[in-house]
Amino acid sequence: MLELYFSRPDTLDRIRSSWIIEPIEKYINWLTQQKYSWRSVSRRVPILLSFGEFARCHDAAWVKDLPAYIEPFVEDWLKEHAGPRKLKRHLRKAADCVRNPIRQMLSVVLPDCPGFSRRHKLENPFATLAPDFFVFLRQDKGLSEGSLLAYSHHLRAFARYLQSIGLDDLRSISPPVLSAFVTSYKQQVAWASVRNQCGVLRVFFRYLYSQRLLDRDLSGTVQHPVAYRLSGIPRCLGWEDVRRMLQAVDTRSPVGKRDYAMLLLLITYGLRGCEVAALTLDDLDWRNERLRIPERKAGHSTAYPLSPLVGQAILDYLRQGRPETSDRRIFFRSQAPRSAITAGALSSRVAHYLGKAGIKVHRPGAHTLRHTCVQRLVDQDFSLKIIGDYIGHRSPSSTEIYSKIAVEKLREVACGDGEEIL
């Protein structure tokens, strides 16, 4: 397999002389199966060779020992190759370019190695005191895996703060410490993140008190930022902007066919990005012209009439854009590895086409189109109950967040005397 990517005999000899040649060859076979480009493979191998030599010089004797040397190697590599880069984001990107191929190779050759940590791993930083907290969140509160990851993220931030101030025992925590943490956290993140962090802490301390792990309930002492209901401006588009965004998609390419179908699903049905990303071939009922959305956020499923325009776009992608795979998901990455597209990647594609069409909107993404769909229904005088049922809301109060401004009515007021409306 090496001969597919390297032709010079001295290069092949140098690669085969590495003590980790077996993992490297196994990794290259995997990259080939995943249809990685020649350039991607040829860039990864030199990094892996340098990593193997670094680990050997630091007394690594077995492949299972390699995970412990990842971060030391990355630090050493940055010192030697990073150059005059000053910004943290540039250093972080350079480190990822080195770290990711190594992590990926180890995930292929050592999938069960205890020393190999994966990203997005659910972690309870307070497992010693409250080992069953995430069991409680999953079983009693019914939270999704995505919500559990968010809880883990916020609790890790809180644990890092406690470690920085030298507070090791959570039983010794006091309201001033919580207040100081929230004040410090406000200076690092956006308002929405502070609000979410405070919500997580309130749930966490309420749980600790209910389990008699703390002597008092500190949840009420976590003061979250003041929020005024319906105070923000909705991030929706005008219908002319929607047309411009769709026209910006080049449907001649496989990527364009995929993106066009995803955009139509978002704008037509007001779906969430995660719901479009999770669609499978089994959710399409071509005979009865139905589209099924299972396991929605509110815990139910929805069946829609399959729009001819949406159905044709999906069919066009399935025939001429979707890679050959046994996976039942509909939408896939355009580059290797050919895995199912994620909600984050889908949202990035929406932002890409909004930018390409010259449309400026606050926080562009998949939810922008969900707002737009709801606003369109509001402008057509549908009731909040009908709109909520259509987009999968359990409570009408949730729909109010998306429909708080009757844009067209306000335009009529601005352009005329507004007496008929008033």
Image: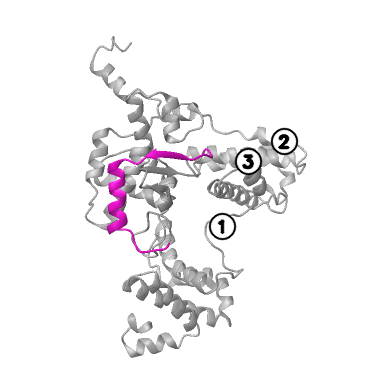
Residue picked out by circle 2: 217
Q: Report how far apart the C-alphas of labels 2 and 3 lie in the structure.
A: 19 Å
Upstream in the sequence, badge 1 or badge 3? Answer: 1
Disc number for residue 141: 3
Reading the chain from its start, which is encountered first: label 2 or label 1?
1
Residue wearing tag 1: 121
Seen in the picture, residue 395 relative to 335 is either above or below; the reply is above
Residue 6 point in image, percent of width and height: 33, 82
Query: Does the magenta segment cover residue 135?
Result: no
For discs 2 and 1, the disc positioned in front in the rendered view: 1
Q: Is residue 198 visible?
A: yes
Q: Nearer the viewer, residue 30 or 365?
A: 30
Image spot of residue 50 (x, y percent): 45, 78
Magenta-drawn segment: 298-326
Q: Secondary structure at mark 3?
A: loop
Instruction: Choose top left, top right, bottom left or bottom right for residue 115.
Output: bottom right
Residue 304 % position (x, y):
39, 38
Residue 87 in sight in this render: no
The structure's colour scheme is one colour
Q: Which mark is residue 208?
A: none
